[in-house]
Amino acid sequence: MPEGPELHLASQFVNKVCAGVVFSGPVIKSEVSKSPDVSFSCEAYRITAASRGKEVKLTLTPMKADEPKRRAKAGQADEPMDIVFRFGMSGFFRFTGEDELPKHAHLRFYTKEKPCRVLSFVDARRFGSWQPNGTWQAGRGPCIMFEYKSFRENVVSHLSDRAFERPICEVLLNQKYFNGIGNYLRAEILFRLNIPPFVSARTALEGLESEDLYENMKPLKNETADITKGVRKKKAKEETGDLLRLCHTVPLEVVSLGGKGYDPEKADYSAFQAWLQCYYVDGMKSLRDHNGRTMWFKGDPGPLVPKDSKSPSPKKRIKKEDHDYTDKKKVAKVRSGSTTKKSTIKRESVTKTPKKEKKDADRRKTKPTRKKTPGANAPQQEAKSGERRRKTSRTQPTDGVAASGPQRRSLRLSR
DNA sequence: CGTCCACGTCTAC
DNA sequence: TAGACCTGGACGG
């Protein structure tokens, strides 16, 4: 779920399924969740949603009580309450029958109907969170999709911030400036402009203006280079725009795919997969950034690559049952012909330091001995395992070759 | 079965 | 700048 587009699609989903629906009673939290209780209860209320970057805000609005006195009932809300959600790595909303609650439904809103239905915040990994009476998190910048102008101004006016000395691929994940960009978007955005991921952000952004000079620019072919301001490196960008503009338009492309954002669990994940040009695409290179996150790219990595960065070994993509914001019931799955095993493309370790190091995004740092485990705790040190290489690996045809177009992931989707 | 990997923050040393 | 926080799917043995 979780990058700007998915959060926005989630808000659209909530507004759609909750339109005209009346909810009632208390908001229920799962036993296991560590997020705050939501002390809101009302005989009749409505739910609406809004998104900003990587957050979604639900607004619970009490409906007018017929009899004013009833409002006095203890514990019955009469004022709206906002709840701000962050989705972590696996959060999303679902609307189901009470008898078919999804696993990991950590916060639930029940409708007033007879066989009631339930709006659930589902989050398997529980990295997500919510804040009752919350507001957009302070410190997060303007939304890259829906506050484009202020987003640009915020970045351009802070280029002297030390934060921009980091590699552009890492700065793109800094939510103070790029609220809504996540791991797949940074890859797709930099790929489109052929910007090496590990060049300093300041270098990649210097010269850009607060105003989007490409905004009203139709793909004109002549290289006028007219306006004094953006004379720099137009031409190649005339039809796409600069880096900041792509931080806005690329996520919007995903929103336009409608309910097909990133989520391998969805029936129509293939549409999103087909949209990806770089992230997890066969033939692309990948390296761990300084935070242990996998950066997908093509061509030159750039000068600021972590000295020991290694290319992780991506497994295959998955495909499962649906769960989909477009509530289009699983329409004839993407079945078609063969399961297209796709021949594993040749691979070779990324040019940089092929040294083996037990580094990995999540658990890399989660190595510590389990305290909870009783008995002879297993000495789970990394068994360095001579080579980390996996045969079905992908990675690049090593720089030089990368000049060709993106390797279309062998992914036939039944049209 | 165990290992590796995942769309993201958070907060301690 | 490491860890912590979590579940579960894909793979390898």
Image (tube, coloured by chain):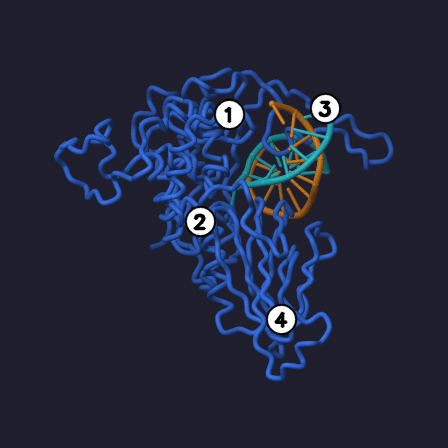
Chain colours: A blue, B cyan, C orange
Check if mark 1 and mark 4 are on a common chain: yes
Residue A219 place in picture, x, y as percent: 19, 41
Secondary structure under the numbered disc 1 in the rendered image: loop
Q: Reading the chain from its start, which is encountered first: label 1 or label 3?
A: 1
* Up-down relation of residue A357 to residue A142 (above or below): above
Between disc 3 and disc 4, the foreground one is 4
Residue located beneath label 3 in the image = A381
Residue A10 place in picture, x, y as percent: 49, 56
User: What number of labels is visible?
Assistant: 4
State the separation of the CA atoms marked 2 and 4. Answer: 33 Å
Answer with left or right where residue A161 lies relative to residue A74. left
Residue located beneath label 1 in the image = A311
Neighbor class of circle 1 (other Cα within 10 Å; few <14, some 14-19, many 20+) is: many
Query: Which chain is mark 1 on?
Result: A
Q: Reading the chain from its start, which is encountered first: label 3 or label 4?
A: 4
Residue A142 marker: none
Residue located beneath label 2 in the image = A5
Q: Reading the chain from its start, which is encountered first: label 2 or label 4?
A: 2
Check if mark 3 and mark 2 are on a common chain: yes
State the separation of the CA atoms marked 2 and 1. Answer: 27 Å
- The residue at 48%/57% (across/down) is A50
